[in-house]
Amino acid sequence: MSTFSRSWNLVKASWSVLRDDKELIVFPIVSAIALILVTLAFAVPGFFLYAAGGNEILGYVLLFLFYLVQYTVLTFANSALVGAALIRLRGGDPTLGDGFQIAFSRLGTIVGYALIAATVGMILQALSRRGALGDIVRSLIGLAWNLATYLVVPVLVVENVGPIEAVKRSAGLLKRTWGEQMVGGAGMGLVFFILFLLATILAGVGVFLGISLNVVALIVASVIAGVLAYIALALFSSTLGGIYSAAVYRYVAEGEASKQFAPELIRNAFRAGK
């Protein structure tokens, strides 16, 4: 099976879960709205700090607080999504209330993990100011962190462990099946990259025709359609990615393959090490 075929099958399997529980997409919507509000809330003091000439220490404090709140919101929404998805993958019928209740029950651990993630974010931000070498080190650390925390949300949701242990547990689970190269999540990313590219091309063609024909309505319609397509794809990508991580966790940690995901789909999402 080719990489793209496998990736497309993963998207379809995740979509089958979303089709049964369409309300799962509400969690990424809530997350996106909350993140916009958080960004606006921090943009105002950030603007005044910059206008006043800036204070480096206050700037770093404000940035750390922004990262902390941002990661708390993201992890909370993802925990609600993954918690509800796990209920469905285990044969249940989750509600929005189930997902939010699960996330609230893990709020302390979620904030603890957000503190760790915010600290890593600050380190990466500092490295980005160290020139080309700093960018290389930043990329390597960022990649390692993303891999190590790939299953951290399902661990936070299911297992009664603290944030540090959750990161260790996530890395340990992934190490069992990752080996030389992980392709599952990246494969789903490939599918959505192609879809984003198609949306960009179609919107671009519409704008080009509108300019060529001097039809303002076509230009505006193409831009609006492109923006809406981007938003929809981003929401679906986030939702399906959360569902997939829940399925991977269930297979790796619990030894169970959900009916929506054939065992070979999960196994082949990772190239096992030797």
Image (spheres, rainbow, N blue to C red):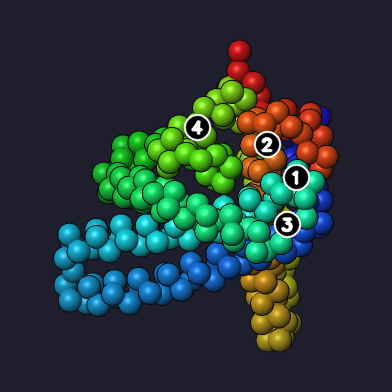
Name the secondary structure under disc 3.
Answer: loop
Crowdedness near tag 4: few (<14), some (14–19) or many (≥20) residues, C-alpha within 10 Å: many
Q: Earlier in the sequence, mark 2 or mark 1?
A: 1
Name the secondary structure under disc 1.
Answer: helix
Q: In the drawing, what numbered circle is on residue 89? A: 1
Tell me: residue 79, above or below residue 90.
Answer: below
Q: Earlier in the sequence, mark 3 or mark 1?
A: 1
Tell me: residue 240, above or below residue 100.
Answer: above
User: What amino acid type should be assigned to the residue bearing mark 3?
Assistant: Pro
Tell me: residue 227, above or below residue 143.
Answer: below
Image coords of residue 166 (percent x, y) = 47, 38
User: What amino acid type should be assigned to the residue bearing mark 1?
Assistant: Leu
Q: Are marks 2 and 1 in contact (CB under 8 Å)?
A: yes
Residue toward you, 225 or 211: 225
Which residue: 35% across, 36% down?
137
Q: CA distance from mark 4 to mark 3?
A: 26 Å
Residue corresponding to mark 3: 94
Which residue: 55% across, 39% down?
159
